[in-house]
Image: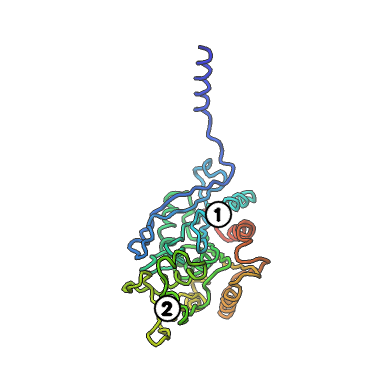
Amino acid sequence: MLKSAVTALSALLLLAAPAAAQDTARVAQLTFEAPSLAGNLEGNSTARNVVVVTPPGYDENPERRYPVVYFLHGYWMPVEVQQAGFRLDEAVQASSETGHDFIMVMPDGFSKLRGGFYSSGPIVGDYESMVADDLVGWVDANYRTLADPASRGLAGHSMGGYGTIRIAMHRPGIFSSIYMMSACCLPPMEMTPDQARAIEAMSEEDVAAAEFFQLASVSTLATWSPDPTAEHFLRIDTGLREDGTIDPLINQRLAANSPVVLMPQFLPELAALEGFAMDIGDADFLLEGNAQFRRELDRFGVEYQFELYEGDHGNRIRERIRTEVLPFFAQHLAIEAQ
């Protein structure tokens, strides 16, 4: 009898006890709906996975609202694998310990060809609007955000670095500050006859077994040079003509998606940014492309900050999100309602 009473009392006390405080950054892996991707011919789902990291104390402060940093991952791996490598929660935790609390959000930029390049097209879908419209709207509706451009930052690595500058130029007034990490695809790409022949000869099995750079070439073509009427299963236009030359229109389409080419058209949008930063490792294979983009920024008087650090394309990204990216946004994002 006594044992039963003690057990019942213990259960009541347990129910009455307050929930444990959220003293560390919390990771949630969720799904949101992205209508912008509807109807794409590649079959990429409108149900998108997303990683959301809330700072310590988020649950205990129901009246508080937070600035948000959106992070765009790179090519090849889905968002869950990217989070395992980047550990955004470590960065949010470290930032909170210095007095700067953020919500951090990383959407899935994966596609059937391993990456949508945060661009827009009929084959892959509108990944650009998926981020700028669908994701931002969903986050603001479901989290206690400071729902204002002044309190939103956008950063990304590699393919995500490209997506960062692309969205900043194409979709002004959504993010006030940006940070590009080892961005890909900045100079104009050029399709050669040999590349075109190799791509057109690929079977579905070849695509499934393709290595990183080979499949990245296919994926960028699907994004920037689509052909919805093509008989080939990839439905891309390589520009290869019967005489073995490349149709100039195809390389013009590729150039039309190059930030080096596009940037002078978007000077007001870049000038309006509160903060603009980029970095790259001194052993990164994308070093020259980034240098070319910086030369154009300098030539047109665009203000930005840059760091060349010791490292390659990926070996210090996790560290630098914590030590450089979030401290940058702590300086440039508004932490109170405007």
Residue corresponding to mark 1: 335
Q: Circle 1: is it few (<14), some (14-19), or many (20+) Cα within 10 Å?
A: some
Calculate the distance from the C-alpha at mark 2 to the C-alpha at mark 1: 40 Å
- Write the residue at 53% across / 17% down: 6
Q: Position of residue 88 (x, y in %)?
A: 56, 53
Is 210 on the left or on the right of 306, as rendered? left
Residue nearest the viewer, comparing 277 with 254: 254
- Write the residue at 67% across / 67% down: 309
Assign a secondary structure to mark 2: helix
Can you tell which mark lies on residue 64? none
Q: Circle 2: is it few (<14), some (14-19), or many (20+) Cα within 10 Å?
A: some
Q: Position of residue 83 (x, y in %)?
A: 54, 54
Residue nearest the viewer, comparing 2 with 284: 284
- Write the residue at 45% across / 49% down: 30
Is 17 on the left or on the right of 139, as rendered? right
Q: Position of residue 251 (x, y in %)?
A: 44, 81
Residues at badges 2 and 1 in contact (C-beta under 8 Å)? no
Is 286 on the left or on the right of 222, as rendered? right
The correct choice, above or below, for 313 with respect to 147 in the image is: below
Residue corresponding to mark 2: 253
Q: Amino acid at mark 2?
A: Arg
Identity of the residue furthest to the right in this view: 310
Assign a secondary structure to mark 1: loop
Q: Position of residue 56 (x, y in %)?
A: 57, 45
Q: Earlier in the sequence, mark 2 or mark 1?
A: 2
Name the quadrant containing residue 41.
bottom left
Q: Amino acid at mark 1?
A: Ile
